[in-house]
Amino acid sequence: MSTPLFETRNVSIAFGGLKAVDDFTLTMQRGDLQGLIGPNGAGKTTAFNLITGVYQPDHGAIQLGGRSLLGLPPWKIAREGVARTFQNIRLFPDLSVLDNVRVACHLRTKANMFQMLMRTRQYYLDEAELSARSHQLLEAIDLQDRADDLARNLPYGDQRRLEIARALATEPKVLLLDEPAAGMNPSEKQELVILIRSIRQRFGLTILLIEHDMGLVMKVCEKIMVLDYGKTIAVGTPGEVQKNPDVVKAYLGEPASAGP
C-alpha cells in the first residue's frame, strides 16, 4: 500500500494530568474528505492544534507525505502544506477582502527580503502574481464582487468563506476546517456543502472537517472519526457511525434504567 498523504499515530497530550487527546490515530489518502466529530470538550480542536503545531504532543507521530511535522512551528507546517480555518473567525477585519487573501499568498512568494525592500523586478512580478491568484481564489468562493470591501463588512457566512479562501492561498495539500458552518443559516450551510465539494475537486485537496451539524457531516464526509474525552470511540462511514452504540451513548448518554 502506498504511503498515506497524511497520518497521525498514537498522538497524545495531557494538560495538568488530564488527557485531552489520547492515542489519536488518523490516516488520510490523497483526496479524502473525512469528518472529526464528538461532544463538546471531546478533544477535536486540540487535535487540530496538535496537527498544526500550536501544541506539541507528549508522544506520537504526525507525518505529511512520510515527513515528520513534529517540532515545526505553525508557519512551517503551513509551508509544508497543512492549512486550517478556526472555530472563531480570525480574519483581518480592517483589511480588504482581497488583502486578507493576499497576506496568505505571501507564504509562497519568491522574492527575498532584499528584493522586497529594494522593490526589484522580482518583487513586482511576485506582487502581480499574488494579486492574480488572490482574485482567482475569490472567484472560486464567489466573493470576487466584494474584493474591495473591508472584511468586517461581509455577512457572517461570507466571512466564513473568506477564511477558507485565505487558507487556500497557502496552497495546502491538507485543509483542516474547524466548524466552518458555525453560525450559518440553513441556506448558507447548503452553499457550504457545495463549496467544500467544489474546492476539493478544483484544488485537489484532502480535507479534515470538524463540525457539530450532523446533517452537514453525514452529507459531505465519506469517513468519520468520533472522539469522546480525547479517545477515539468509532471510525467508519456515516451510516456505520450513526448506528454505533458508543456514539449514541456519547451524544445522548446512558438510557435511563426502568424503575421497579
Image (cartoon, helix red, strand yellow):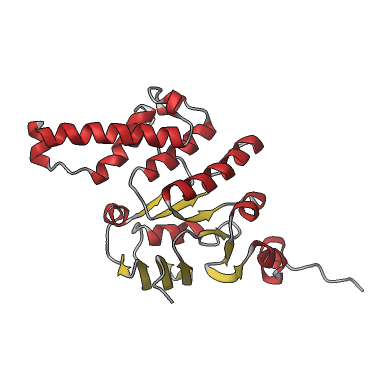
Q: Residue at x 41, y 69 (%)?
A: 4
Please state if 158 lies on the left or on the right of 254 as rendered.
left
Please state if 77 lies on the left or on the right of 1 as rendered.
left
Residue 77, given in percent of the width and then of the height, sits at: 31, 57
| Quarter of the image where one finds residue 49 | bottom left
Q: Residue at x 54, y 48 (%)?
A: 197
Residue 125, given in percent of the width and then of the height, sits at: 18, 34
Answer yes or no: is residue 58 visible: no
Q: Residue at x 21, y 43 (%)?
A: 109
Please state if 248 lies on the left or on the right of 22 as rendered.
right
Residue 246, given in percent of the width and then of the height, sits at: 67, 71
Please state if 127 lies on the left or on the right of 104 as rendered.
left
- Nearer to us in this view, 3 or 11: 3
Residue 54, given in percent of the width and then of the height, sits at: 35, 57
| Quarter of the image where one finds residue 183 | top right
Quadrant of the drawing holding the C terminus: bottom right
Q: Residue at x 45, y 37 (%)?
A: 140
Question: What number of labels is visible?
Answer: 0
Extreme residue toward the right, this view: 260
Q: Is residue 81 above or below residue 190?
A: below
